[in-house]
Amino acid sequence: MFRSFLGGIHPHDGKELAKDQPIQVMPAPKELVVPMSQHIGAPCAPCVKVGDLVKRGQLIGTSPAFMHADIHAPVSGKVIRIEERPHSGRISCPAVVIENDGEDSWVDGLPLVRNWTAMTNEEILNAIQSAGIVGMGGATFPAHIKLKPSKPVDILILNGAECEPYLTADYRLMLEMPTKVVEGTQILARVLGVARSVIGIEDNKPEAVATMKKACEGTGIEVVALKTKYPQGAEKMLIKVLADREVPPGGLPMDVGAVVQNVGTVAAIADAVEHGVPLTERVMTVSGDAIAEPKNLRVRIGTKYSDVIAFCGGFKEEPDKLLAGGPMMGVAQFTDEVPVMKGSSGILALTRKLTEHGPEMNCIRCGRCVKACPMGLVPSMLSILSKRQDFALCRDSYGLMNCVECGCCTYVCPAKRNIVQYIRNAKGFVRAEMAKAKAKEEQAKKEGAKV
């Protein structure tokens, strides 16, 4: 049965470049740059200093904040610098720079051999937290927090859709390591206490559907083929098509009894629980028409994009855009010196013939963005109001904060308007105002308490 949702688009997926490339292990480079902010929440602070010798898997960054994920050394070696370095999601970020000694020695006691069925739920959650696991589809929400919902849940949804064009890392993971995905799913189902676990995979990946169905035989885990349509893999879309539930505006999946995780995340959780292995590497796609040899790679966290691209033969043509992630929701980079992080699903290099956008014009009121929006919004009005800086009207009357920033509106716009960018600007302003209001309220409470 093929399932889908209202809205969405059908961009050229470009997956033919890398989908048949098995996962290769990229050797760790001589120098690794490990950012202290790789997750949603408070950034970590280094717990090592320049000159320290570290082992792979050793804790090098942590925070007392509730919302954070610990960071570990991806190789053994020497800390040679702690400084600001380029970051794929912002201008820069403090990072620990490690000189690889080439020995790849694990910290004492790792890896382990454990039977997760003999572990308590608390022990499993502690193992996930200690390993610094985050959502590896790109959201980077700390996994141990997501697995302790404050409301009852009855369904676990695994995102194997990988609807973003060009990216094929999750596809190769399901083909090559289906048992690890199944084990991770079983671990999470036990911790959450859910009766139903479902893996959703787009129907343009029939080999992955067949492989996962075979791996799930006798486990009770369902594998469902979903209609190929972007953004089928968005959290709210998956919940709608697999559970027929709608997350309320401003709500979370747990509000409708669901938890959603990426297949890459559950594979990392299996490693963390069964072997105590921290998240020090990940599978990612390197693709695009400017890349000489598109590949799917297992890469150490902290490897610079320049090193990854060189391992793929470098550029065969001069790229016009270098993206962290895919073409729809990825972030354009100003340098190839940014490092691979926990949420790095792919590196994409595109030439001018694919990125040519044309000049932006006034909205022609055609309604194509409204038809394409999977959230049922009116993106054209949001962009117009944002350009006028009428952010309050965007928020109060047009559902600004419900936008998932999938980019469907920009893709279909015949006027070449950068709609999603206008929306992001508006959301940023609204969040800033909300933060100011919250700070003011907290300050008032403190002053009231003093009185």
Image (cartoon, helix red, strand yellow):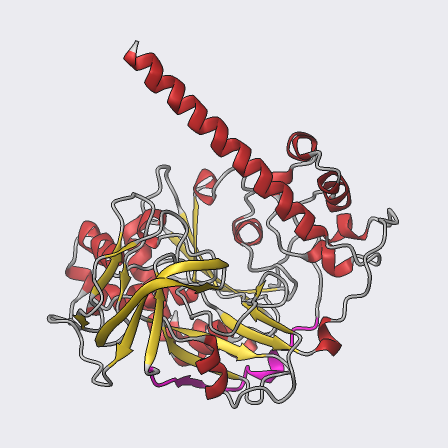
Can you say whether 405 is above or below 149 in the image? below
Residue furthest out toward the top: 451
Q: Nearer the viewer, residue 430 or 142?
A: 430
- Examine the image and state in which quarter residue 388 appears: top right
> How far across and down, in percent of the image, does residue 337 sit?
47, 73
Magenta-drawn segment: 12-28
Would you say residue 200 sits in the magenta stretch? no
- Examine the image and state in which quarter residue 128 appears: bottom left
- Examine the image and state in which quarter residue 444 appears: top left
Residue furthest out toward the left: 108
> How far across and down, in percent of the image, does residue 405 sit?
61, 52
Q: Nearer the viewer, residue 52 or 114?
A: 52
Residue 318 makes an appearance in the image: yes
Residue 6 makes an appearance in the image: no
State whether the magenta stretch is mostly helix, strand or loop.
loop
Q: Is residue 163 left or right of residue 55?
A: right
At 62% from the left and 48% from the top, the residue drawn is 424
> How far across and down, in percent of the image, does residue 223 sit?
47, 65
